[in-house]
Amino acid sequence: MAAQSTFQVDKRDVSFVLYEFLKADAELKKLPPFSGMSKNDFDMVVNEAAKMAVNTVAPVNAVCDRSPVQFDKGKVTTPAELKAAYKAYCEGGWLGLTGPSDFGGQDLPGVIGLATHEFFMGACCAFTMYGGLTAAASRLVFHYGTGEMKKTYLEKMYSGQWQGTMCLTEAGAGSAVGDLKTTAKKSGDHYLISGQKIFISAGEHDMCENFVHLVLARIEGAPKGMKGVSLFLVPKYLVKGDGSVGAYNDVQCVGIEHKMGIKGSATCTLSFGEEGKCQGFLIGEEHRGIQYMFLMMNEARIGVGIQGTGIAAAAYLEALRYANERIQGTDIEQFKNVDAPRVPIAKHPDVRRMLWTQKAYVEGCRALLYQTALWADMAQFHPDEDERNKAMGMLELMTPICKAYCTDTGFKVTELAIQTFGGYGYCQEYPVEQYMRDIKIASIYEGTNGIQAMDLLGRKVSMKGGMYLMTFLNDLNIFCDQHAGHPVLGNFVKNLTETKDKLAGVTMHFGGLGMSGDQLYPIYHAAPYLAFFGDVVIGWLLLRMAVVAQEKLDRLCADNCCTDDDTKRKLCADNSEAKFYDGKVRAAKFFISQLMPRVLGYEQAMMSGDRSGLDVAP
Amino acid sequence: MKILVTSKRVTDPDMKIKVKADGTGIVTDGMNYKVNPFDEIAIEEALRIKEKGGGAEVVVVGIGGKDAALEIRSGLAMGADRGIHVLCEQAVDSSVVAQILAKVYETEKPDFVIMGKQAVDDDSNQAAQMLAGALGVPQACFASKVELAGDAKSARVTREVDGGLETIEVTFPAVLTADLRLNEPRYASLPGIMKAKKKKIDEIPVASLGVDTNPRVKFVKMTEPPTRKAGVKVADVPTLVQKLKEEAKVI
Ligand SMILES: Cc1cc2nc3c(=O)[nH]c(=O)nc-3n(C[C@H](O)[C@H](O)[C@H](O)COP(=O)(O)OP(=O)(O)OC[C@H]3O[C@@H](n4cnc5c(N)ncnc54)[C@H](O)[C@@H]3O)c2cc1C
C-alpha cells in the first residue's frame, strides 16, 4: 500500500449540485432506464466512490509521479501500487458504472458517473485514465460494433481484463485527424492494418491480458481527408473462438513519452502491422469512422472537463486547508504592532481573493459539468421529444465550454493553489505542484482548447440556424427577469443581464462579419470568445445556485431566530450548513463582481477591429 | 447456518460535532451518517464466515426511523443476504436495544449474533452483553479473532482484554462482538450496491414486538468537553521536575 494522501472530496457541494440545485433525482426518475433508482441509490454509489477515491486511489498519485511508467523492449511496466489499486477498482466494478448491464455494466446515469469521476480524477488522474479509456472504447463498440464484437469484447473490457484505447493521432495528424496515413487493406473477413500511431494513452502496460485498440485508418483507395477514414477494432492478441486470448496480432509498442505530468499514464507509440499481419475488424460502415468518433465526442469532452475540475477541486481544497493552518504575519490592521498575534494566512485579503477565485471557478465548473451530463442523459432518454431536443441543443452548445473552460480555469486554479502555499507549494512535499503539471494536458488532448473554441464559434453557435444559442439566451433572459428584484442578488443579476447582452452583441457582430465574407477576424477571437461565453454561463449557474442557497440560508436564520447581521454572521461561523450556503452566495457575488468583468476587456478587444496579430505571424 | 448482524446508523465520527446551546443534544444540520464502524467489522466477519463455505445466511438488523434503512442497505451492499428494519422513531438506550434484538432473535433463531462492540455515537458498550443476558446465552465480546469449530456448533474467540489477549470457547447460540482488529471491512462493490436494491428488508414496527421501549437511562444534559487550558513554560528541567512533583503530583 502507498502512503496515505491528504486528498479530500467536497461531498457537500457535490450533493448540493446534484440534488438541491439540479434536482437530478427527480429529473432522472422521468427517464425510463433510471425510473427505478432513487437518491439513496445514487448516494450510496457516490459515497462508495468517494471512499475508494480517498483510500485506494489517491495514495497512488504521488507514486505515479515519482516512479513513472517504464518502457523496455516493447513492454511497459507500471508501479506495483498502481496495479494493486487498479485491481481493486476493477473488482469494485467502477469501470462499468454507466455501461450496459447486458455486458457487465451497471446502467447508471451519466451524471452520477460523472460525480464519481470527479473524485477519481482528483484522486489520481493518470490512474483514472486507464479505466476511462476502456469505458470510452467500450461505449463505441456497444453503439456501433456488431453483435459478435459486443459478445467477444465488452464483458472483458468492462471487467478491466482487457484495455480499450483510442488510436487517432499520428505524427502528421494531430488536430488534423483527417490527414492520417495508417492504411487498411481488405483481406477476407478482415482488413490488414499498417501504420504508426503516437500519443496513445494506455496503449501498452502490464495491468491487463489484452488490448482492444480502436484505430482510425484509411482503406486503400478511399477519399482523402475526414470522409475517407474508417474505424477498426484491432486487438493486440486475436481472440479465440472460446473467448480466450490467442495469437499475437502484430501490434507493437515501440516507445513511450516522458512527460510533464500524468506520469503514471503510459503514452505510447504503437506500430501496427510491421510484419504485415495485423488484423483489423471494421466497425460500422466504411469511411464513416470520424462520424462514429464524433458521436462519442460530447461524452469524451465532458470527461476531459471533469478531469480539469476534479484536479482543480482537489488543489483548491488543499489550498483552503493550508491557508487556515499556516500561520504567517499579523492582521493587516495591526501591522505596526510587533506583538500582535500571528494569524493564519487565510486572514490576509490577497489570500482570501485567491481562495474565492479558486472556489468560484471550481464550483461553477462543477455545476456546468453536472448540468451538461444531466442534459446528455435527458437528450438520450427523455420520453418527450421536445425535452430531448432541447437537452440535445444545450449539450451541443455547452460541450466545447465544458472541455475548454473547465480545463483552462482548472489550470488557473492549480496555479493559484500553488501561490496560496507560497514556497511550499512549489515543492513536492505538498501535492499542488503535481496537480498543476497533471492538469495541463487536459487543455491539449481530446481536441486542443483552440479547436474547442472554433467548434463553439464556428459550429455550435450557428447550429440549427442559431437555435441552440437562442434557447440558451432565452433561458438566461427568463432567469434574469425573474430575479432582477432579488433582495440580496438583484444587482448581481442585473450585472449578468448586461454581460449577457454584450455577449449577444459580439456574437451578432461576428455573425455580420462572417456574412460579409470575413471569417478570419471572428475565428482569430475564438478563444477569448469561448472564455467570454464561459464566464456568462458560469455566472448564470453560480447565481442560480446562490438563489437556492439564499433561500435555505434565510430559512436557517429564521429557524435559529437570527434577525440582525450580527447573529446571522455568528450562525454562519457556528453552523456548518449556514456557512456552506453563505459560501455559495458569496462565491456567486464574488464571481460576478470580481472575475466576470474581465469580459469587458474581451469585448473591447473583439470590437476593436485591429488585425495586427492576425495578418502575419511574429 | 444463520448469522444475525447489526447495523446502527451513527453520526459520522469524522465530522466535527457541536452541542446545541441548550444542551438537549447535538446540532444535526448538515450531519452525515454512516454505519457504525464496529458494526461494519461485525458484518465483514459474518460475510467471511459465510464465504468460507457452509452456506450461511447473513441477516442485518437495524433499529431506528425511516432513514436507518440506509445503513441496513449498506450492509446488504457489502454482501449480506437480507435485512430487518425495526421501525422505531423514539430514542432508545442499550437495554431497549437488547430487548428488541432479543425479540428479533426469537423469530429468526440464528446460530449466533455478531455486533459491533459499541456504537461510536454513544460509546455505551452494553447492548450485546445485555442481549446475551436476556437470552441466557454465552457471550464473547471484543473479538479480535473468531474461529468456528468444524461442526459449526461453537467458536473459539480471541478477545482483547486489558492485560492482552484471552482465548475462550463459546457454544452456540451465542452473542459475539467485534473489536477493531478483527478484520478490515471491505468496500461495497458497485455491483454489490446495485444488487442490494433487490434484496429484501422486512419492516417491523417496534410496537408489534411488545417491548417496553421506555429507556432506563435518563438523558439529563449534553455539554462540550472543557477546552484544555493553555500550558505553562518552565525555565529549566529542575523546575519541571519540581512542578511535576508538587503541582501535578505525577512523580
Ligand atoms: C499525454 C497525451 C495523451 C494523449 N492521448 C491520446 C490518445 O489516447 N489517443 C489519441 O489519438 N491521441 C492522444 N493524444 C494526442 C492529442 O490528442 C494531440 O496531441 C492533440 O490532438 C493535438 O495534436 P498535436 O499534438 O499534433 O498538435 P497540433 O495539431 O500540431 O497543434 C499544435 C497547436 O496548433 C494549434 N492548431 C492546430 N491546428 C489548428 C487549426 N486548424 N486552427 C487553429 N489552431 C490549430 C493547436 O490548437 C495547438 O495549439 C495524446 C497526447 C498527449 C500529450
Image (tube, coloured by chain):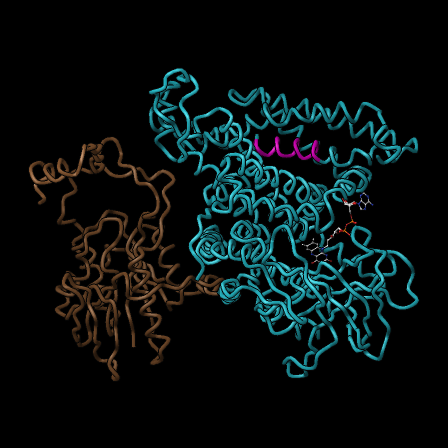
Q: Indicate the quadrant where residue A32 lies.
A: bottom right
**Picture layout, residue A34 above or below residue A542:** below
The residue lying toward the viewer, choosing from A99 and A255, is A255
List x then y, in percent, for residue A236.
70, 73
Q: In this view, does B37 lie to the left or right of B97?
A: right
Decide whether residue A538 is among the magenta residues.
Answer: yes
The residue lying toward the viewer, choosing from B62 and A243, is A243
Whether residue A374 is visible: no
Q: Is residue A272 left or right of residue A81?
A: right
List x then y, in percent, for residue A302.
65, 48
Q: In this view, does A233 lie to the left or right of B96?
A: right
Magenta residues, start to end: A531-542
Q: Is the magenta stretch mostly helix, strand or loop?
A: helix
Chain seen in brown: B
Residue drawn 61% across the image and 74% down it: A209
Residue drawn 36% across the image and 38% down it: B29
The residue lying toward the viewer, choosing from A196 and A110, is A196
Quadrant where the C terminus of chain A sits is top right
Chain seen in cyan: A
